[in-house]
Image (cartoon, grey):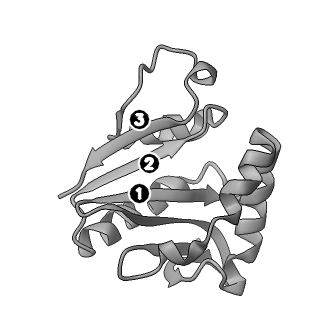
Amino acid sequence: MTTLEVRRVRQSDPIAAPLVAELTYEYTTRYGPSGAQEMQRPADVFEPPNGQFLLLVEAGEAVAGGAFMRYDDETAEMKRIWTHSGHRRRGLARRVLLELEAEARTFGYSRIYLTTGPRQPEAKGLYLASGYTPLFDVETDPLTIGPLPFSKVIH
């Protein structure tokens, strides 16, 4: 088994391009034009001192990644957590989440906030299984809610 390397990069780094392209395609496929709009937002918010973009790299290829940005003084907002389609079901998204949480702590954040879309049940499951508190009624049809917000206190 090859080793995973955590790399802190800019979203514009060439190694991130295939992952970002696949995420953009997925958002657009699931959500139409609004999905494409999300990926057109400036990525400089994911750079220090208030944010970070990181990748899990295996054999020179980005296999998963994600980012956080400043939400408020105590809170980081997670964004763009993604596993390449050829590397799913290996726990990589959970690893990205743990790496981002640890990185957010080093930036002085004590809380995480994030939203996922109602058409991403795998993301909803990941956040529930990773100790995130849903800020919505989990018994309600997600398609009637819109974005699904979560929070978590990190120490």
Image quadrant where residue 85 sits: bottom right
Per the image, the residue denoted by label 2 is 114
**Left or right, 79 with reference to 111:** right
Q: Three-letter amino acid code at disc 2?
A: Leu
Q: Position of residue 69 (x, y in %)?
A: 43, 66
Image quadrant where residue 118 sits: top right
Image quadrant where residue 21 sits: bottom right
Q: Quadrant of the N terminus?
A: bottom right
Residue drawn at point x = 76 percent, y = 55 percent: 36
Q: Is residue 2 visible?
A: no
Residue drawn at point x = 45 percent, y = 57 percent: 78
**Left or right, 35 with reference to 58:** right
Of pointers 2 and 3, the one earlier in the residue sequence: 2
Q: Is residue 99 visible?
A: yes
Distance, label 3 to label 1, CA atoms, is 16 Å
Residue drawn at point x = 71 percent, y = 67 percent: 20
Give the numbered dot on residue 141. Answer: none
Q: Secondary structure at mark 2?
A: strand
Q: Position of residue 150 (x, y in %)?
A: 39, 39
Per the image, the residue denoted by label 1 is 77
Per the image, the residue denoted by label 3 is 128
Binning the other alpha carbons within 10 Å of mark 2 as few (below 14), some (14 to 19) or many (20 upward) gives many
Q: Pointer 2 and pointer 1: residues touching (CB < 8 Å)?
A: yes
Task: Looking at the picture, tell me which residue is in the foreground, 40 or 140.
Answer: 40
Of pointers 2 and 1, the one earlier in the residue sequence: 1
Q: Position of residue 140 (x, y in %)?
A: 51, 14
Q: Three-letter amino acid code at disc 3?
A: Leu
**Left or right, 61 with reference to 127:** right
Task: Looking at the picture, tell me which residue is in the foreground, 121 or 77.
Answer: 77
